[in-house]
Amino acid sequence: MRILLVEDDQRIAGFMKRGLAAEAYDVDLASGKAQALALIEACPYDVIILDIFLGVDDGLDICRVLRQRSMRTPIVIMTAKDSAETRQASEEAGADAYLPKPFPFDDLLATIMRLHKSYVSADSLREIKAG
């Protein structure tokens, strides 16, 4: 499974990439909006993980752009600022899941698997209806 991780904190990004690679995921890293969108244009991803606060960029803005482009790839939003407003903004932007930092790594893995299974099942159903 190919994952795009958009995180500007190199320490966190490195930790997450190593952990996901240890679980046999292929992970690409982006630190901001332009880099993330360029990678998404160049390569299909099975799951996208977005931090909300990316220096000058905003992960929710990236999420909105992807949904406006009708991209159905599952998106996980993660943030250090957990609040009801942030959760609602994530949902309104089109995120499929929300993880407040810090979170147990096992929670991330479970979220990825749940979203991927749901996405694959939905694609299979669309193919059956179209065929």
Image (cartoon, grey):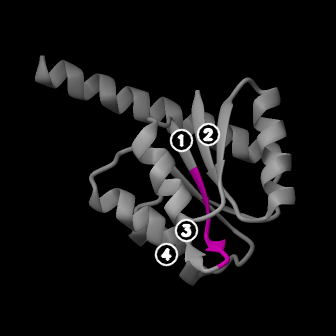
Residue that mark 2 sits on: 112
Residue that mark 1 sits on: 47
Residue that mark 4 sits on: 88
- Asked if the residue under mark 4 is in contact with the one under mark 3, i.e. CB atoms within 8 Å, the reply is no
In the picture, which quadrant includes the C terminus? top left
Magenta span dominant secondary structure: strand
Mark 1 vs mark 4: in front: 1
* Magenta segment: 49-55
User: Marks 1 and 2, Cα distance to the nearest angstrom?
Assistant: 7 Å
Q: Is residue 70 above or below residue 87?
A: above
Q: Which residue corresponds to the image point at 71% horizontal and 39% vertical from the top-left?
A: 109
User: Marks 2 and 3, Cα distance to the nearest angstrom?
Assistant: 18 Å
Instruction: Choose the circle earlier in sequence order: 3 or 4.
Output: 3
**Residue 123, percent from left and from top:** 32, 29
Instruction: Choose the circle earlier in sequence order: 1 or 2.
Output: 1
**Residue 42, percent from left and from top:** 44, 40
Q: Is residue 87 left or right of residue 81?
A: left
- Asked if the residue under mark 3 is in contact with the one under mark 1, i.e. CB atoms within 8 Å, the reply is no
26 or 39: nearer the viewer: 39
